[in-house]
Image (spheres, rainbow, N blue to C red):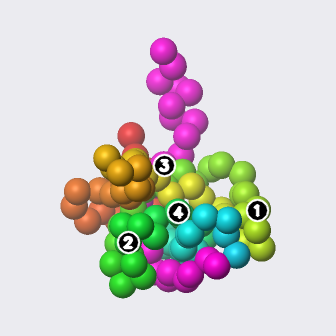
């Protein structure tokens, strides 16, 4: 069991994807995302979600991401946030998203 205060150390925020680029340099198929987190600004993320999503479906989509992990170098790209997803029955990543539109930057509790 984890203490609730430990959970609160993980800063999960809602954001809207505002740009999507192919990421051919990645070892596994991925997109480079730019995500608007409102008052926190825009952040970049690499996401291996090409099996279920295309660029058009991702633009304007709200997602949840961890915003307080250290940046990670992924090939020539620096991923600033961890975009959250869960695997479906085929093992493909399904993005975690608010059921309804919320303000960008709002924190998950």
Q: Which residue is mark 1?
A: 73
* Crowd class of label 2 (few under 14; some 14 to 19; many from 20; radius 10 Å): some
Task: Give the spatial CA distance, label 1 vs label 3.
Answer: 20 Å
In the rendered structure, which segment of residues is drawn in magenta?
Answer: 1-24
Identify the secondary structure beneath mark 3: strand
Residue at the location (22% across, 61% down)? 100
Q: Residue furthest front?
A: 90
Q: Position of residue 93 (x, y in %)?
A: 42, 55
Q: Which of pointers 1 and 2 lies earlier in the amino acid sequence?
A: 2
The nearer-to-camera label among 4 and 3 is: 4
Q: Which residue is mark 4?
A: 48
The nearer-to-camera label among 4 and 1 is: 4
Q: Is residue 4 left or right of residue 44?
A: left
Mark 3 in CB contact with mark 2 (< 8 angstroms): no
Q: Decide whether residue 85 is among the magenta residues.
A: no
**Quadrant holding the C terminus:** top left
């Amino acid at each position: 069991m984890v203490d609730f205060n430990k959970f609160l150390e993980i800063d999960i925020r809602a954001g809207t994807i505002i740009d999507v680029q192919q990421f051919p340099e990645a070892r596994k198929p991925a997109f480079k995302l730019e995500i608007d987190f409102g008052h926190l600004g825009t952040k970049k993320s690499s996401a291996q979600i090409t099996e279920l999503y295309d660029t058009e479906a991702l633009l304007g989509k709200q997602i949840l991401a961890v915003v307080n992990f250290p940046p990670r170098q992924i090939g020539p790209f620096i991923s600033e946030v961890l975009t959250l997803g869960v695997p479906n029955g085929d093992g493909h990543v399904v993005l975690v998203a608010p059921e309804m539109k919320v303000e960008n930057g709002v924190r998950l509790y």
